[in-house]
Amino acid sequence: MTKLKVTIAGIEFDARFEEEAAPKTVAAFRAQMPYTSKVVHVRWSGEGVWIPLGETDFGVEYENHTSFPAPGQFILYPGGISETEILLAYGGVHFASKMGQLAGNHFITLTSNLDKLKEIGPKVLWEGAQDIHFEEV
């Protein structure tokens, strides 16, 4: 199993790919690694941050999808009725857009420093977009 390091707003987390449950999503994301972007606070979904990806096509359909990711879980919404995005729950999330409820593929789970996760949401909400970086270690 490959280990990941995810750094958000200067806070480092260990993580793992959900390779058995979401193999196509993991493969599509892994092809983009190392991956660097910005996270902004969600608008409709609750306590989460997201990476808006517009019309990006990862070439995947639903697998291991959920509308209720737990804190520390990343989901990839492959697009459709809303834009493609990656969302990280830091608290309670009911994944949605202005069009209604959505579901995304749970493909990465944070495995360390979960107590620091609650710091990210307020920082992004009050200070604006923050850097995020994914790398295999």
Image: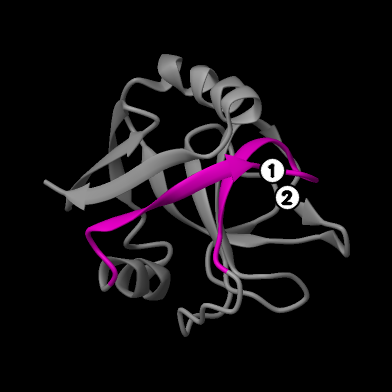
State the image quarter where residue 27 is shown. Answer: bottom left
Horizontal arrangement in the rendering, residue 133 relative to residue 93 (left or right)? left
Q: What secondary structure characterizes most of the magenta part?
A: strand
The answer to whether residue 104 is above or below residue 82 is: above
**Residue at coordinates 40% horizontally, 30% vertically from top-left?**
9
State the image quarter where residue 54 is shown. Answer: bottom right
Instruction: Identify the mark at residue 93; answer none if there is no mark.
Output: none
Amino acid carrying label 1: it is: Val
**Residue at coordinates 88% horizontally, 64% vertically from top-left?**
99
**Residue at coordinates 42% horizontally, 66% vertically from top-left?**
22
User: Helix or strand or loop: what does disc 2 sit on?
Assistant: loop
Instruction: Identify the mark at residue 95; answer none if there is no mark.
Output: 2
What x and y, as percent, mark residue 89?
58, 37
Q: Is residue 48 magenta?
A: yes
Tell me the magenta residue range. Answer: 32-53
The answer to whether residue 62 is above or below residue 72 is: below
- Pick whichever, 25 or 42, lies toward us: 42
Q: Which of marks 2 and 1 is in front?
A: 1
The answer to whether residue 51 is above or below residue 79 is: above
What x and y, as percent, mark residue 73?
49, 42
User: Helix or strand or loop: what does disc 1 sit on?
Assistant: loop
Disc 1 target residue: 42
Amino acid carrying label 2: it is: Phe
Q: Distance between the residues labelled 2 and 1?
A: 9 Å
